[in-house]
Image (cartoon, helix red, strand yellow):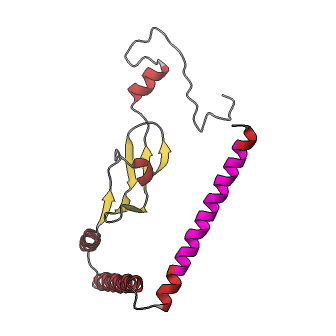
Amino acid sequence: MTKRQMANLENLMRESKERMDQLERHSEKMELILMVREPGSAAAAEAYDGLRKQIIAGVTDRLAHLTQLVQFDAALRNEASPEILSSMVNGWIDASGLLVVFDPPHEQRELLFEVVEDLKGEPEVLEPAYVDVQSSRVIRRGRIRFGAPPFEAVSSFLDIPTSGDQSDERDVLIPNEETEGNGE
């Protein structure tokens, strides 16, 4: 097959795909039109039922949220202790199916946590991540910092003696904010 024939074939395939996409869109429009014109059809009944369920769920969620706000306001007005407020919030988190992730070695760490500082050491969670258990959707990313590695790791990397062995005296200057730009 020549290059020209191959190009023609590719063009035909692309045009066919575009036409199929267009037919699918037209089919969906026709289905919607029929649903509106024939409210007694099975598709219209399913759509109506789905919409009704979403509205009920929305109203229920709003009522639950308003109830939490009222409980929180009442607790604040009664000068509730931080322990009581924390207990209330933890109860709401548990009831809502929200997962609070404090686990730095989590298998999806890159998705769950924003790295604030990386000095190649041990991870430290600054703020937890929040995940909806039902949908597995990340509601809020956490923040994590990797501290400085232990001195032994740095000294072995730079070949600095760590024991009392001073036979090889060398001045090692590790650049930091104070020494950079001073010309020292």
With respect to residue 40, does 75 lie above or below? above
Instruction: Give the main secondary structure, helix, strand or loop, of the magenta stretch.
Output: helix
Q: Nearer the viewer, residue 43 or 3?
A: 3
Total number of numbered labels?
Answer: 0
With respect to residue 148, does 164 lie above or below? above
Whether 145 is among the magenta residues is no
Q: Residue at x 52, y 75 (%)?
A: 28
With respect to residue 15, does 154 lie above or below? above
Task: Tell me the quarter of the picture where residue 139 sits.
Answer: bottom left
- The picture places residue 35, in percent across and down from the top left corner, at 47, 86
- The picture places residue 88, in percent across and down from the top left corner, at 26, 74
Q: Is residue 7 left or right of residue 133?
A: right
Q: Is residue 101 left or right of residue 181?
A: left
The image quadrant where one finds the C terminus is: top right
Q: Residue at x 45, y 36 (%)?
A: 120
The image quadrant where one finds the N terminus is: top right
Task: Tell me the quarter of the picture where residue 57 sits.
Answer: bottom left
Span shown in magenta = 6-30
Whether 19 is among the magenta residues is yes
Residue 143 visible in the displayed image: no
- The picture places residue 169, in percent across and down from the top left corner, at 50, 12
Residue 1 visible in the displayed image: yes
With respect to residue 168, does 174 lie above or below? below
Residue extending furthest top? Answer: 167
Q: Residue at x 38, y 47 (%)?
A: 124
Residue extending furthest right? Answer: 4
- The picture places residue 159, in percent across and down from the top left corner, at 47, 17
Q: Nearer the viewer, residue 100 or 150?
A: 100
Q: Residue at x 43, y 58 (%)?
A: 141
